[in-house]
Image (cartoon, helix red, strand yellow):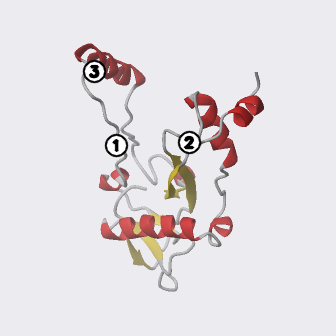
């Protein structure tokens, strides 16, 4: 059976097989790739406003003129549609991402680190939970990356949609 068969057979209101319905619902939602595609949709504008608000509340950057000899990095918006387990939309998520791949090791930064959980750890926790018949919950923590302070001087061009003072760049205080 192909996916088209499942999507015709199972509607969101009447779903017996979770995975085929989930896949079918994901195929119906398209995530924008550019800022220009999102500014016309109030749901995406709201998601971007929430992200910018979190960035300002956490003092992620300061506006300042670009110092001589420094080159600012670019940034872009990343858009994701978060779904509930039944395949319906939970929320629209916009994330501002710095394009750090333009930086050079030893000049713009000294080391990189990203806290990531290994799948073997997740499986081990699931085994313990199942063995003890404990209840397991999942939660999504917003803006956890904002806690990483930067020791390097990193300058970024202001993101699209943010009214920065003329002639200024964003000096990052925290990692993006």
For label 2, count other residues whose C-alpha is less than 10 Å away and answer few (under 14), some (14-19) or many (20+): some
Q: Quadrant of the N terminus?
A: top right
Q: Residue lying farthest bottom?
A: 166
The one of 110 and 28 positioned closer to us in this rendering: 28
Q: Give the mark nearer the N terminus: 2 vs 1.
A: 2
* Residue with the mark numbered 2: 87
> Could you say where residue 142 lies in the image, as x and y percent from the top left?
37, 53
C-alpha separation, residue under disc 3 versus residue under disc 2: 25 Å
Image position of 72 (left or right of 172): right
The one of 107 and 157 positioned closer to us in this rendering: 157
Location of residue 159 with respect to 13 vertically, above or below: below
Q: Residue lying farthest front?
A: 14
* Residue with the mark numbered 1: 139
Does residue 68 appear anywhere in the picture? Answer: yes
| Residue visible at 56% across and 30% down in the picture | 18
> Could you say where residue 71 lies in the image, as x and y percent from the top left?
53, 66
The one of 88 and 78 positioned closer to us in this rendering: 88
Q: Give the mark nearer the N terminus: 3 vs 2.
A: 2
Q: Secondary structure at mark 2?
A: loop
Q: Nearer the viewer, mark 3 or mark 2?
A: 2
Q: Secondary structure at mark 1?
A: loop
C-alpha separation, residue under disc 1 versus residue under disc 3: 16 Å
Q: Residue lying farthest top?
A: 131
Q: Secondary structure at mark 3?
A: helix
| Residue visible at 60% across and 42% down in the picture | 12
Q: Quadrant of the C terminus?
A: bottom left
* Residue with the mark numbered 3: 129
Does residue 150 appear anywhere in the picture? Answer: no
> Could you say where residue 105 lies in the image, as x and y percent from the top left?
47, 46
For label 1, count other residues whose C-alpha is less than 10 Å away and answer few (under 14), some (14-19) or many (20+): few
Q: Nearer the viewer, mark 2 or mark 1?
A: 2
C-alpha separation, residue under disc 2 versus residue under disc 1: 17 Å
């Amino acid at each position: 059976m192909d996916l088209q068969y499942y999507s015709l057979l199972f509607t969101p209101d009447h779903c017996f097989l979770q995975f085929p319905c989930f896949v079918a619902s994901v195929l119906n939602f398209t995530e924008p790739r550019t800022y220009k595609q999102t500014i016309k949709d109030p749901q995406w504008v709201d998601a971007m406003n929430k992200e910018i608000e979190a960035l300002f509340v956490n003092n992620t950057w300061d506006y300042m003129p670009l110092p001589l000899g420094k080159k600012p990095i670019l940034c872009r918006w990343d858009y994701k549609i978060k779904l509930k387990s039944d395949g319906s939309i939970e929320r629209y998520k916009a994330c501002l991402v710095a394009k750090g791949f333009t930086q050079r090791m030893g000049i713009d930064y000294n080391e990189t680190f990203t806290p990531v959980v290994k799948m073997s750890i997740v499986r081990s926790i699931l085994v313990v939970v199942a063995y003890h018949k404990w209840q397991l919950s999942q939660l999504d923590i917003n803006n956890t990356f904002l806690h990483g302070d930067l020791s390097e001087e990193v300058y970024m061009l202001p993101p699209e949609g943010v009214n920065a003072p003329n002639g200024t760049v964003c000096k990052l205080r925290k990692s993006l």
